[in-house]
Image: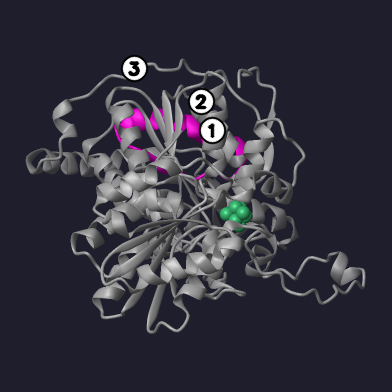
Amino acid sequence: MEKTDREPYALLGDEAVALGGLHAGISAAYGYPGTPSTEIMAFLIAEHERGGPPARWCANEKTALEAGLGVSFAGKRALVTMKHVGLNVAADPFVNAALTGTGGGLVIAAADDPGMHSSQNEQDSRFYAAFALVPCLEPRSQEEAYRMTREAFDLSERFGMPVLLRLTTRLCHARAGVTPEAARERNRTSEVRDKTRWSLIPAFARRGYRRLIDRQPELLEWSATHKANAIEWGEDPSFVVLTSGVAGNYYEENKADLAAAPTRIHIGAYPLPPDLLRKACEGAGRVLVLEEGQPFIEERLRGILPVPLSVSGRLTGAVSRDGELDPDTVRAALGLAPRKNILSDGGITLPDLPPRPPQLCQGCPHRDSYETILLAGAGLAPLSINADIGCYSLGALPPYEAVDSIVCMGASVGMARGAADAGIPYALGIIGDSTFLHSGMTGLIDAAASDTPMTLIILDNSSVAMTGCQDPVLPSESLRALLVGLGVPPEHILELEAKKQRIEENARLLRREIMHPGLSVAVFRRECLEAARKRRKKQGHAGETARETEEKDA
Ligand code: SF4
């Protein structure tokens, strides 16, 4: 994207972050797909194809962050993207990068998913920034997402540490105008610092940790004067509303209806500035905290403000302890009557619609795989089926209800191994090809080392389908050699075509491997229909439905 002439773009929050990174002069970007962060890298990859800096999907978030750190140590700027749970995977290099420090600016954009629209938890990435003792910026608009991304790179170089950019779903996936500034020169080399900092042997690591601690007062000075942390004095000094991130917008939508404007303080830059918070709350009787995610600020306020001051928020029930905020929940927390709307005022009653739980696409290869697995396991007991993160997680729901556990990326492999060690005779793991490459391989090495009596089923649809059909880091053809290299006995690697016509034959072969008293792996192959449709569209077959693609590919 060449245009930097202050003409606004209508961008998703994710795209604003990507553009901010490009205009900050990044030399590379790395990430692993995950809702709601995926569109950052999608934008950067499209730019790369037009001559922009390298932008690559990685095997997982840890390898992405390590690649970013390598760029940083070479004195250049790198953006690394992931969803919130991906930061768990990348936590090791993230926390340690705070001790090594950085060379060129290193910014990690972590997108949280409050309300769990497409995630297994709603953890709040601000805790990671506080844990690692590094700065965090939390934009509340697409414009701020663009500016804060640019600023984060300057900040990373100023303090010599990684900076976390915390995003949330509604910001990532809503579109608004962004006015870009002139782009910084790409590939500019920042001053490379003392290299002894970058090797975390204990003697250097102790010095690095001390240095990190010593810089904390500077970070506090920075956040105390940051323009995203601002007090807006109100008419009612007894009541303070504290907002952060997109919750600030929900407050803005409602504040005109309050009888007297409370004092309001918004936080967009962390670490929390204690003096500023005390100043805003001086003379107040109560404080209401409106923050998206977990009660990060609310918990800390109790150690910052005087004890008699009443603090309410998610911990007290003034705001729901879980789920996303929205203008109506914020309105209720402010004590305002529900806003009139077309339903309440127009006498409209919504019809009782039948529930529509998510389902695998019609014709999805996973449907045939699950039917095969259920047939193969029929009558075998006890049978433990541990699945993983991907479209195939839907095998937990009707009509299959085939799954006993889904925990986190890659867990299916280790959990099947544990089940086998616990004496369950028929222990299965079910994992997608991309999730296997992400974090299933290491668990399989453990199982191969002890020839654990379990069967791992890899559903290879040649796609990271759930996040929009990105290409896996390795093609399907590499899988067999990889499995053999990891130590799986070649005679117990079963390669099957996931097709309706083959269900009975496949089930018979799979059952034999499930009964085998050692490790076996079954690979079910057929391309995701959506991925196939996209591939054929690229090849000039636009307008085809998924079903038509399936028929033509067959
Ligand atoms: S997107 Fe692909 S893998 Fe996912 S449910 Fe649809 S066909 Fe199956």
Give the residue number, with chain letter if any, for mark 2: 22
Give the residue number, with chain letter if any, for mark 3: 189
Q: Residue at x 50, y 40 (%)?
A: 471
Judging depth in this view, the residue of 521 and 91 nearest the camera is 521
Mark-to-mark CA distance, 3 and 1: 20 Å
Q: Main SS of the magenta segment?
A: helix
Judging depth in this view, the residue of 41 and 374 nearest the camera is 374
* Secondary structure found at label 2: helix
* Secondary structure found at label 1: helix
Query: Which residues, given as a range, are shown in magenta?
Result: 136-165
Q: Is residue 25 above or below residue 375?
A: above
The answer to whether marks 3 and 1 mark residues whose Cβ atoms lie closer than 8 Å is no
Cβ of mark 2 under 8 A from ligand 1: no
Amino acid under disc 3: Thr
- Disc on res. 18: 1
* In the displayed structure image, the side of residue 9 where residue 430 appears, left or right: left
Q: Earlier in the sequence, mark 2 or mark 3?
A: 2
Q: In this rendering, does residue 60 appear at all? A: no
Judging depth in this view, the residue of 136 and 350 nearest the camera is 350
Estimate the x, y position of residue 465 in percent, counting from the top left: 55, 50
The answer to whether marks 2 and 1 mark residues whose Cβ atoms lie closer than 8 Å is yes
